[in-house]
Amino acid sequence: MRDIRLHGFTLIELMIVVVIIGILATIAYPSYRNFTTQARRSDAQIALTRVAAQQEKFFSDCTTYAGTLVGTRDCATGILGLAAATPVLSPDLHYEMTLVAPTASTGTCPITSCFHLQANPDGAGVTRRQAGNGRLRINHLGQKSWDKDNTNTPNPTTHGSYSKKWSDK
């Protein structure tokens, strides 16, 4: 009688490998999602910092901050000139940049002497990857804040600090 040996994997060995891969994927995937969300959030942070720098340059050239982000740059009308048309988007299109207008009821300074910039997650509805991730803000003093829970407190017509900072996870 001949001894025939077959080489290969048994079904049980293959199923064990599949189960191990499944367990590893279950552990790794949430960490991966958190990492990508934070990386996309840095898109807004970079965009806000750039727009704030443009506001400071506008202030040094025009002795006032711009009241409008969109249009042809003009000191007389207060147009910063970031884009030809709305919306002004972050580099990777995850956030929309807006200038939050001051109101008399908030007791804050007028746009001519201060500014509050806001990054709305998925404001333009382009990627939908950051929807509900909270608004980020920066002001003329360089103070950075994040409405992590997207409660809109303070709301777009008011000013103030959010409880979370950009560095909070």
Image: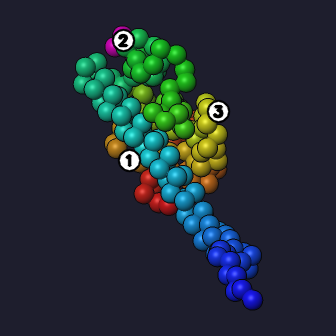
Q: Residues within 10 Å of mark 3 (few under 14, many from 20)?
A: some
From the viewer's perspective, is 32 left or right of 62?
right
Three-letter amino acid code at disc 2? Asp
State which tag comes first along the sequence, 2 or 3: 2
Q: Is residue 164 above or below residue 159?
A: below
Q: Secondary structure at mark 2?
A: loop
* Magenta stretch, residue numbers: 74-78
Determine which residue is flagged by label 2. Answer: 74
Q: Is residue 43 above or below residue 25?
A: above
Q: Is residue 24 visible?
A: yes
Three-letter amino acid code at disc 3? Gly
Instruction: Give percent across and percent down for residue 30.
Output: 60, 63
Determine which residue is flagged by label 1. Answer: 143
Is mark 2 in CB contact (under 8 Å) with mark 3? no
Q: Is residue 34 above or below residue 27?
A: above
* Measured Cα–Cα span from mark 1 to mark 3: 27 Å
Q: Residue at x 31, y 23 (%)?
A: 58
